[in-house]
Amino acid sequence: MLNQNEFTGKTVFVAGGTSGINLGIAKAFAAAGARVAVFSRSPERVERALTSLRTLGTDVLGFSGDVRDMSSVQHALSSTSEAWGSIDVLCSGAAGNFVAPVALMSANGFKSVMDIDLLGSFHVLRAAYPFLTKPGASIINISAPQASIATPMQAHVCAAKAGVDMLTRVLAMEWGPEGIRVNSIVPGPIDGTEGMARLTPTPESRQAVIRSIPLRRYGDISSVANVALMLSSAVCDYVTGVVLPVDGGASLAGPGLFGAPA
Ligand code: NAP
Ligand code: COA
């Protein structure tokens, strides 16, 4: 049964939690009474996120750093645990994206996204491990449809997010015996986000995506955040290693969702 108070006083850490979907997740946990720490590169973004999280009346912490830099990730996680105790919910969602065909992508362009999305996720998961609540922690990795749908102009994201989902599955096995659950959420096209602004920059491209979604609309940030809460709650205490689309059925539509080559 869903317990309305189960997140009160819990410690939640959201990597990349200062804008878009990840900030929505941070806000949902804060609204549910959890203490929430967020981490991202821009100190201004961290400050803005903290200002909006504080209005929800809970304890908040913010750290500026880069998921590509293990020491900044370690610092943020150890400081959070020092302040509030072990980490009950870890959400890893920092990511980068741009639209480019492989033929026009530099090695450094490919590497940037691999380093942020995949190596960055490893850094967050690995650095958090000593501080996770055992048993009981819930880890949510934020994946993307590109992890399982071959998508032109998205080779870097496809490769990186496929790796993220495999980390989810492997860690569900490695850390399951300690009572840590690890799941991926796969958001579909979500309204008002940087990700979709980059992938569908014109009204025409947006409409083309909407036509391919069974529910015929973009999703809301709150719909993804609600599933993060659900997966972390006791109602899902036997759910681990799952890669869960929150996408209005978009993953049923097959390849090319975010744009075929011209
Ligand atoms: P967003 O608003 O750009 O959020 C990305 C967040 O990650 C920002 O807070 C950003 O803050 C942080 N970040 C980026 N690079 C970082 C780095 N190197 N180190 C630390 N933090 C970093 O994007 P979004 O569209 O909401 O996407 C959020 C997540 O959902 C991503 O994992 C994305 O792949 C996934 N997703 C989104 C959609 C969608 O419809 N938007 C669909 C599928 C999956 P700083 O710039 O301050 O670092
Ligand atoms: N097309 C082709 N290559 C691109 C590109 C584009 N649109 N945008 C960036 N690159 C390349 C750069 O040219 C550079 O390669 P080079 O050194 O060979 O020229 C490489 O990517 C790194 O770019 P840089 O801007 O130095 O990286 P960064 O670490 O500052 O930023 C990005 C990383 C590129 C992913 C940046 O877009 C970002 O920070 N994104 C975060 C927000 C986001 O993407 N949100 C959506 C999440 S789904």
Image (cartoon, rainbow, N blue to C red):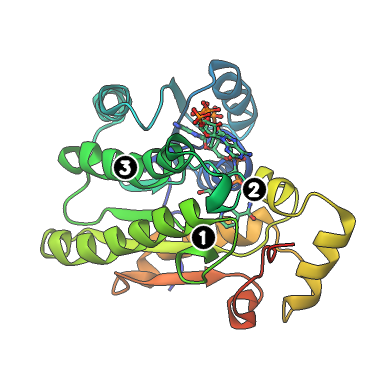
Comes first in the chain, label 3 or label 1? 3
> Disc 3 to disc 2, how far (Cα)?
19 Å
Q: Position of residue 112 (x, y in %)?
A: 44, 36
* SS label for mark 1: loop
From what the image shows, is residue 203 above or below residue 247?
above
Q: Which mark is residue 119?
A: 3
Q: Tell me which residue sits at (35%, 47%) in the image.
A: 118
Task: Give the amino acid type for the residue marked by disc 2 in the picture.
Answer: Gly
Residue furthest out toward the front: 103
Residue type indicated by callout 1: Ala
Instruction: Identify the disc placed on residue 117.
Output: none
Q: Residues within 10 Å of mark 3 (few under 14, many from 20)?
A: many
Taking the spot 52% from the left edge, 71% from the top edge, the residue there is: 149
- Say which quadrant the N terminus sits in: bottom left
Residue at 15% across / 39% down in the picture? 130
Q: Quadrant of residue 83?
A: top left
Q: Which residue is mark 1?
A: 144
Relative placement, left or right, of 176 versus 233 is left
Q: The disc labelled 3 sits on which kind of residue? A: Leu
59 with respect to 226 (left or right): left
Name the quadrant where ligand 1 sits: top right
Residue wearing tag 2: 195
The answer to which image quadrant residue 222 occupies is bottom right
Q: In the picture shown, does residue 1 fall above or below 120?
A: below
**Mark 1 vs ligand 1: CB below 8 Å:** yes
Q: Earlier in the sequence, mark 3 or mark 2?
A: 3
Q: Residue at position x 32%, y 26% from top? A: 69
Q: How many marks?
A: 3
* Secondary-structure class at tag 3: helix
